[in-house]
Every structure is written in C-alpha cells, then in structure tokens.
Image: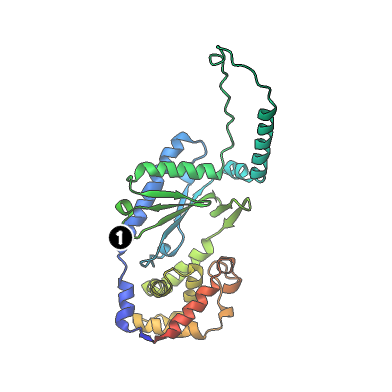
Amino acid sequence: MKYNLNKELIEGLRDSTNNEFVENINNLVYYLVTESMKELAVKSSFIQIDKISLLPVNEIYLGAVCSNSEYTYFLGIPNKEIELNSLEKKHFFKNLWNRFVRAWRISRNKPKRKKKKNDEENVNLPTRTLSKYTIDDLKTDIVNQISNFVTPTTIIYEYEDHISIIGREDLGSNVKVNIYVCLYDDKNDVYKLYNGRKNKFYDIDLKQRFKNLNKKYETCGENFVDMVRIYNSLYSKAFNKIPNQILIESLLCACPDSLYSNDLYQTFINISNYIRLVDVSAIRSIYDNTKSIFKEKLIVDVNAQVDFSRLIKLLDLYKI
C-alpha cells in the first residue's frame, strides 16, 4: 500500500515540533551542567570553569527535532592530567586480579593466633591510598552534582562514556538527555571521547560539520532545517529511530540550492527525487569534505548505510 505524502502531511510534520519546549529543554541542560560544574570546581582542582564547553551535537544543533529525538551534548573539560591518568588503566583488570590473588595467598598462609583481650583496642586502621583521578571519576562526580539539582523522580544513568537523564517532572514526557563527558582541547576546539575497552581517546573535531551546516543555512534558510526535520520525522515514524544525522545532513547539504524553493512541499519533492537519482558516491561527508559519505567513519562505523537504504525504500513506498 502506498501512502500519499501530500502537502498537508509535509507541512504538518514541519509544524509538529514545539520550538518553545525544545528551547526550554536546552536551557535546562545548560543550567544543570553550569551549576553542577560550578559546585564541582569548588571541590576539585581539575575544573576550570572558563574553559569548559557544552555543545549540542545531534539534530538539536539545528533544532530539527521530532518526537523520537534525544538531546545529546558533548561536555568538554580541558585537563591533560586526567587524560594521562585515564590511559594508565591499560592493564587494570589484570592488575586487579593479581592483587586479589596475592591478598588471598597472604591471608591463606597467615598463621592463626588467639585473640588477646586488648586486640580490639590496639587495632591499626589501614591507611587509604588515593588513586589517580580519571575520566571515570570525573563522570561520577558530575553525576553526583547534577543529582543535587533535579527532583527525586528524575533518574540519572551512568554509562561507559556518557550520562543519560530521564525525568518527567524535570524534563517532560518522552525526553532523554545524553551528555558525553569528554576531555577538551580548548586551543584547537577538539573533543576527546574516551573508549574504556580500547583504553584510548578519540579526537572529534566538529568544526567542519558546523561550518557546512551554517553555510547551507545561510543560502537556504529555514527550508533547510525544515527538510532535516521532515526526513527525521518520516524515518522515525517508519522505523522508530532517528537516522544517522551525519548521513541526513550530508545528503541535504549536497542538494543544489536551487532545489530549495519558497514552497515547502515542492522543495520536498525536488529533494526526494534528487536523492533517489543522484550518484551516491559523489556526495561528500559534511564532517570531512574529502570523503564520500560511505567512506566516512561516523557513517560506516555505525552502519548508517542501512539508514540510507531504508530511506530510499521509504521514499519509494510513498506516492510523491
């Protein structure tokens, strides 16, 4: 069965987002992070408030959100010492097991003796060895600080590389906030995302992507943002997930400016036909203009080719 993507539906998808609600969520996230980092800076020498960066990195950068959108940010904190401390965990589990085995052997071979009456009085408390402060410690401290600024019904999940916040009372219904805790090269504006399994920081430089998005917005205006939102909405309704944004933004940035007319529905027709007919290998990634979209790590590594195939099939299912 083919559905009719008529003008009323396309315009309805554009108008379905409550921009005021999106702005309120964005403002709340900045408030929670700002206040939490201020509190943490008082207790930690690793935090320099004036050098911290909080950046929206998914569709909320353009405001092209739909009902399934999550609010994802990079929180960048510059500190070379934390980076070095974190990388020293290369053999963490092996060392942990070795320490356990040694401790077990010592306790097993230790001769037993009868307790004296004054043993309890002469107990020596073990001295605590402070471990080096790592990116994981930083993430845990941020979670603890944010929890002081939200209501008890809000839940904060701590994952390997990010924090997720869900709470109807604070954020509203069907809202999930993701904050990726990164180290930050403030001189070059590069984020360093830690992968614990590989014990490695990956540099993520978003400047080229944002430069391309801003340039397209300057030439095509809100029509460009509307197209991103409409494709996100159509894909979301069909597959219950948001498509890879580097892929979607690359496709829509590659469309000639002349296809973006003053009529929203005609723009959608123009772009849909162009995407279905264009040589995909010629489309450049907005993250790195030297690469085609299917040689882009941020597309290939997350299997976004599936998103592209689904998108084309989705357009073919509709009567345009």
What is the x, y in percent for residue 56? Answer: 44, 58
Quadrant position of the C terminus in the picture: bottom left
Q: Quadrant of residue 174?
A: bottom left
Q: Is residue 273 above or below residue 74?
A: below
Quadrant position of the N terminus in the picture: bottom left
Assess disc 1: are there few (<14), some (14-19) or many (≥20) residues with their C-alpha within 10 Å of its C-alpha.
few
Q: Is residue 173 left or right of residue 295?
A: left
Amino acid, disc 1: Phe
SS for callout 1? helix
Q: Is residue 291 above or below residue 43?
A: below
Q: Is residue 98 left or right of residue 279?
A: right
Q: Is residue 147 visible?
A: yes
Q: Nearer the viewer, residue 69 or 74?
A: 69
Q: Is residue 109 above or below residue 7?
A: above
At 51% from the left edge and 68% from the top edge, which residue is drawn? 246
Q: Is residue 112 left or right of residue 230?
A: right
Label 1, on which residue? Answer: 21
What is the x, y in percent for residue 215? Answer: 46, 69
What is the x, y in percent for residue 297? Answer: 59, 66
Q: Quadrant of residue 4?
A: bottom left
At 41% from the left edge and 40% from the top edge, which residue is drawn? 38
